């Protein structure tokens, strides 16, 4: 098959989201051909370059989301009128409040606003295709006026009515950036129109090219979300953002997510937590297939299979240092642990995430120095703090496996978490874990570790003490955790799951090539679903019901020609 892999801010760039997962997926499915369509987020990401690509990647097409010049598309009066009407419908859908009787906190996806949004979106896409782009129009004064009119409508959202000129300009700029894929030239027969399946590695803007390919050429769309984009937008919105902007952008991303889930042939959440979000946003339960992320288990095999030689009094925390990880709670819990187990130690292994993470790491270091003054065994000994802050690659933790091997218990203290990668790594290493009940933690642990409420230092300390004092229980939980991780969270199971999904989706997708005989009449079942698979059955079948290779030597065969996106290719040449 030929797969169009749609990414945003990730693969094939060196830095970005889902880079490792996409690379493992492409390399693991060497029997397929991949075309990569990547949206970049920053100039730095583009200048850092790409990762080495395997031979099954036929081509890469990129487009920036961080900048856009004038597309130079000259619009006549008719095109301007089409744009104004479509954009007015789009903004009206954003400003429409929930229907009477619907739960106010539920993002209801069924109703006239969803249909209105989808119709307006595809109308803008068709206009962009006809006019050669919409970047200038989406930035124009006409767009601002259309949004203002929608906000001033009698039945508009209460928050939207308060929008002033700065808020309107901010919203229009955000919408232009999110709708920038409408102006790309990716949807012709030599682009996404030539693939068998579009696979979006995230929802939101990353899936928008797949929506348009489905609209223009009927290409089926598969959407994978390991972190729900709508949830990420809600969490990432600053409290300083004006209420009108927050309300309008939340409505846009909510309706875009609903359209993506509705049109996709299949949606694969990475865990049940993400699946609940998608169901709440209108995803059909029959389309949802949970596929856990695949992680490399071999790098932790030596630690997981070796005898446990870790210090039985050491706790380890591994991850990115940021406020969501709630290391403050962990330090207060460790203060309780030290009162019960004076020889206990805590390793915090990780690098800060950005400027906010750097400031948070400074706060944690200051709190650790305040709670645990340097201690010395004798008068002439140098004091030592029981809390150590390390980074991967340092002398104490050369790699991740060494970090997990150093402790008897691995701790996760987050207040916000999606899929807990650090817990899976600890499970590969055969370590017992203590975690807070957030995100997909309970689903990942599955009874092989202890789970406590978040922001509860006392409960976290009691769980850690229970495992520190019971080595047999630690060993039993660690062995069960490793067995569970090897069964569910390896690269091999992830690649196998997507291979099966590709075959299933393509086998149920509508035929896009129409085979006709010499009179121009279509041949029923001329290109069955099996035509997507390599083999002799991919030959066009003739009216007499036999494939071309089955005819006797010298026997006359009526000519068959193909119409549609591609010409029929003999099986011997690789259909």
Image: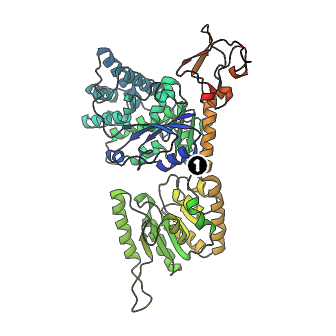
- Where does residue 542 sit, x and y in percent of width and height? 68, 16
Q: Quadrant of residue 563?
A: top right
Between 564 and 168, which is closer to the camera in this rendering? 564
Quarter of the C terminus within the rendering: top right
Task: Give the residue at x 38% y 30%.
Answer: 184
Task: Tell me the colour scheme of the image.
Answer: rainbow
- Where does residue 98 sit, x and y in percent of width and height? 46, 32
Task: Give the residue at x 49% y 41%.
Answer: 201
Left or right: 427, with 546 as reference point? left
| Residue annotated with mark 1 | 292
- Where does residue 204 sit, x and y in percent of width and height? 45, 38
Is residue 5 something one can see in this rendering?
A: no
Left or right: 324, with 245 as reference point? right
Between 342 and 401, which is closer to the camera in this rendering? 401
Work out which residue is located at the far bottom of the displayed protein and give it.
379
Is residue 145 positioned above or below 244 on the image? Answer: above
Task: Give the residue at x 51% y 78%.
Answer: 344
Left or right: 255, with 479 as reference point? left
Left or right: 536, with 431 as reference point? right
Is residue 82 positioned above or below 416 on the image? Answer: above
């Amino acid at each position: 098959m030929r797969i169009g892999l749609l990414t945003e801010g990730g693969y094939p760039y060196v830095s970005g989201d889902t880079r490792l997962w996409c690379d493992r997926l492409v390399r693991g499915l060497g029997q397929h051909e991949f075309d990569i369509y990547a949206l970049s987020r920053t100039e730095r990401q583009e200048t850092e370059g790409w990762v080495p690509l395997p031979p099954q990647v036929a081509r890469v097409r990129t487009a920036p989301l961080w900048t856009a010049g004038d597309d130079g598309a000259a619009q006549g009066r008719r095109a301007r009128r089409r744009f104004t009407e479509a954009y007015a419908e789009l903004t009206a859908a954003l400003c429409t409040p929930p229907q009477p009787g619907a739960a106010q906190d539920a993002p209801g996806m069924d109703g006239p606003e969803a249909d209105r949004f989808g119709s307006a979106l595809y109308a803008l896409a068709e206009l962009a295709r006809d006019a050669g782009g919409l970047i200038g129009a989406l930035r124009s004064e006409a767009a601002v006026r259309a949004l203002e009119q929608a906000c001033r409508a009698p039945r508009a959202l209460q928050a939207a009515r308060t929008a002033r000129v700065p808020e309107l300009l901010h919203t229009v700029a955000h919408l232009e950036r999110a709708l920038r894929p409408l102006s790309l030239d990716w949807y012709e027969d030599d682009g996404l129109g030539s693939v068998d399946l579009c696979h979006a590695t995230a929802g939101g803007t990353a899936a928008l090219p797949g929506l348009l390919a489905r609209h223009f050429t009927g290409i089926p769309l598969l959407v994978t979300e390991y972190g729900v984009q709508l949830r990420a937008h809600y969490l990432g919105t600053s409290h300083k953002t004006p209420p009108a902007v927050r309300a309008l952008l939340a409505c846009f991303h909510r309706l875009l997510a609903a359209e993506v889930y509705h049109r996709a042939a299949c949606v694969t959440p990475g865990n049940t937590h993400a699946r609940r979000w998608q169901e709440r946003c209108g995803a059909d339960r029959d389309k949802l297939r949970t596929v856990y992320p695949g992680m490399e288990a071999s790098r932790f095999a030596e630690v997981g299979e070796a005898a446990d030689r870790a210090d039985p009094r050491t706790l380890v925390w591994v991850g990115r240092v940021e406020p969501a990880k709630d290391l403050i709670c962990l330090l207060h819990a460790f203060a309780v642990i030290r009162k019960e187990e004076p020889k206990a130690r805590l390793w915090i292994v990780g690098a800060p995430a950005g400027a906010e993470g750097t400031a948070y790491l400074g706060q944690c270091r200051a709190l650790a120095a305040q709670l645990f003054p340097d201690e010395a065994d004798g008068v002439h000994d140098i004091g030592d703090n029981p809390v150590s802050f390390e980074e991967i690659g340092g002398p104490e933790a050369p790699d991740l496996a060494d970090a997990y091997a150093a402790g008897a218990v691995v701790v996760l203290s987050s207040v916000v978490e999606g899929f807990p990668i650090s817990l899976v790594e600890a499970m590969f290493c055969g370590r017992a874990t203590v975690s807070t009940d957030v995100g997909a933690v309970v689903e990942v642990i599955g009874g092989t570790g202890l789970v406590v409420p978040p922001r509860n230092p006392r409960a976290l300390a009691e769980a850690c003490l229970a495992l520190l004092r019971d080595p047999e229980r630690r060993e039993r939980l660690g062995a069960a955790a490793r067995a569970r991780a090897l069964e569910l969270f390896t690269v091999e199971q992830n690649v196998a799951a997507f291979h099966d999904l590709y075959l299933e989706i393509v086998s149920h997708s509508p035929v896009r090539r129409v085979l006709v005989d010499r009179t121009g009449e279509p041949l029923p079942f001329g290109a069955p679903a099996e035509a997507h698979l390599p083999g002799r059955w991919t030959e066009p079948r003739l009216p007499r019901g036999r494939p071309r290779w089955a005819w006797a030597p010298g026997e006359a065969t009526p000519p068959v020609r193909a119409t549609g996106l591609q010409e029929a290719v003999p099986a011997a040449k690789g259909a």
